[in-house]
Image: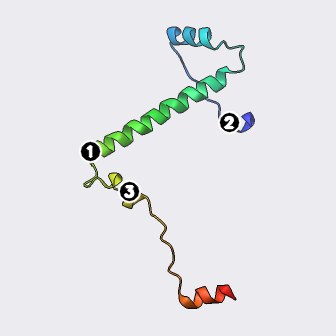
Amino acid sequence: MLDAMKQLLVQLDDRLASELERHVPARSRQRSEFVRRAIRRALDAEIEARMAEAYRQTPDLEPAHLDPAVWERVARPTPRTKRAAGARKR
């Protein structure tokens, strides 16, 4: 699976590189996974921040999210006819 991954060269300042080395040494096979997870978290936070800003700029006009009828459809029983009820008894 690692063969299919794209490699990136990232430059770090001395302080950040030292911190990374202290927490996840280069000889550890977990360093790449650590960096991937850190990038994923940063990207998720960026997406969340952009979405929150979009909602601040264009809020919902009505609080539809508070009305259960909008987001939760309750299944109503199907009315049974006499013919259908009688056919089942046979």
Res 31 → quadrant: top right
In this image, 27 relative to 77: left or right?
right
Which residue in the protein does label 3 denote?
A: 68
The amino acid type, in three-letter code, at marker 2 is Met
The amino acid type, in three-letter code, at marker 3 is Pro
Name the foreground residue: 86 vs 58.
86
Name the foreground residue: 29 vs 89.
89
Instruction: Give the label, 2 or 3, closer to the camera.
Output: 3
Name the foreground residue: 88 vs 13.
88
Residue sitting at x 41%, y 58%: 71
Residue sitting at x 38%, y 56%: 68
| Residue 10 placement (x, y as % from top left) | 56, 23
Q: Quadrant of the N terminus?
A: top right
Disc 3, SS: helix
Residue sitting at x 38%, y 36%: 49
Which residue in the protein does label 2 denote?
A: 5
Res 46 → quadrant: top left
What number of labels is visible?
3
> Which tag, 2 or 3, sits closer to the chain's start?
2
> Which tag, 1 or 2, sits closer to the chain's start?
2
Q: Quadrant of the C terminus?
A: bottom right
Instruction: Give the label, 3 or 1, closer to the camera.
Output: 3
In this image, 78 relative to 29: left or right?
left
| Residue 35 placement (x, y as % from top left) | 59, 24
User: Is residue 21 depicted above or below 34 in this figure?
Assistant: above
Alpha carbons under labels 1 and 2: distance apart? 37 Å
Which residue in the protein does label 1 denote?
A: 57
The amino acid type, in three-letter code, at marker 1 is Gln
